[in-house]
Amino acid sequence: MTATTCRPYPAAVRFSRKPANLRSIMREHSGYHIEEERVFVSAIKTMTSAEYDAFVCDLSRTQDWIASFKGRGDQCIVIHAPARVTLYIRPEGYDYARYVGLADAD
């Protein structure tokens, strides 16, 4: 797992609040209209497929790398993994994935 801080760039993202896992996000996004929000990506987290799968099984679990994120409320972390959907995490000061989103293009 690697983390990179980047110059903030904009993204249009549809967020779910306090999702339990990736499956609940996908269900919510397919069944409800979720307004997109404009946020700024200020960190990139690259995971292996196994790390990603472990992470999305329990999104409410405390993560040290999320706790150390010091972004503003409109900043988020993007999560990349091979052959997996890209996620956007907006912790808003918490140590877990409080808001998890999908880009509008995903």
Image (cartoon, rainbow, N blue to C red):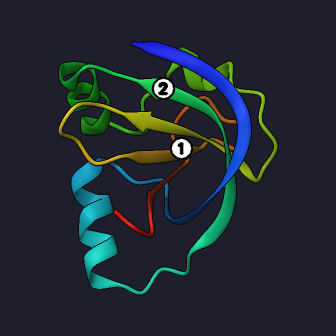
Q: Position of residue 59 (x, y in %)?
A: 38, 39
Looking at the image, residue 43 sits to the left or right of residue 18; the answer is right
Among the two numbered marks 2 and 1 on one chain, the one whose residue lies closer to the N terminus: 2
Q: Residues within 10 Å of mark 2 (few under 14, many from 20)?
A: some
Front one among 26 and 98: 26
Q: Secondary structure at mark 2?
A: strand
Determine which residue is flagged by label 1: 89
| Residue occupying image coordinates x 27% and y 50% | 22
Front one among 94 and 15: 15
Determine which residue is flagged by label 2: 45
Looking at the image, residue 74 sits to the left or right of residue 83; the answer is right
Question: Which amino acid lies under the numbered mark 2 shown in the image of this protein?
Answer: Lys
Q: Position of residue 49 (x, y in %)?
A: 20, 25
Question: Which amino acid lies under the numbered mark 1 shown in the image of this protein?
Answer: Ile
Q: Position of residue 102 (x, y in %)?
A: 42, 59
In which quadrant of the rendered image does the N terminus lie?
A: top left
Q: Position of residue 91 (x, y in %)?
A: 63, 41
Q: Residues within 10 Å of mark 1 (few under 14, many from 20)?
A: many
Where residue 26 sits, quadrant-wise, is bottom left
CA–CA distance in space, label 2 to label 1? 10 Å
